[in-house]
Amino acid sequence: MEKLDLPESEWRRRLTPVQYHVLREAGTERAFSGHFTDNKADGIYRCAGCGNPLFDSDDKYDSGSGWPSFTRPLSEEAVTNHEDLTHGMRRVETRCAVCDGHLGHVFPDGPPPTGLRFCMNSVALDFKARSAG
């Protein structure tokens, strides 16, 4: 997978201020404010920064957390996970493997089959519906 490395000025040009804050500064949108939290459409969630395919709607579930949640990424190569010790907590941050954009965090409290909850920010995602037929 080829990496996308852009100067911060280009990221600021491409992204909205909220997207920039989340994807480039590891911010978090408010719970229950994201436009994909309740999305039930069939398709693929992509990185809002670079378009990298990240998650399949078949793996999305309602975690009750207020953020779109998935049991697994589309592929192991789609995301990278990193230790996050900010805010006095020990968490695992999930980033896009192509542009290194902050997507959210993964927690070990999800449903089967993985037991994981990839808790993502809606503003870090784009959605492409699967075409019928």
Image (cartoon, grey):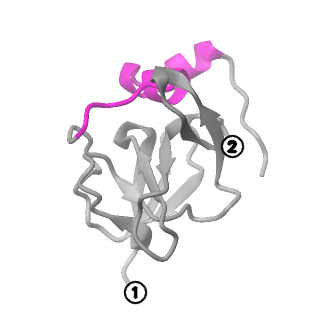
The extreme top residue here reads 9
Where residue 17 sits: x, y (%)? 39, 19
Residue at 35% from the left image edge and 71% from the top image edge: 42
Q: Could you tell me if residue 47 is visible in this image? A: no
Where residue 100 sits: x, y (%)? 65, 35
Question: Which of the two discs, 1 and 2, labels the residue nearer the N terminus?
Answer: 2
Q: Which residues are magenta?
A: 8-31
Which one is nearer the viewer's eye here, 82 or 87?
A: 87
Q: Which mark is residue 98?
A: 2
Residue type at mark 1? Gly
Query: Does the magenta segment cover residue 130?
Result: no
The extreme bottom residue here reads 133
Q: Secondary structure at mark 1?
A: loop
Residue at 55% from the left image edge and 56% from the top image edge: 54
Horizontal side of residue 124 vs 49, given as left or right: left
Where residue 58 sits: x, y (%)? 41, 73
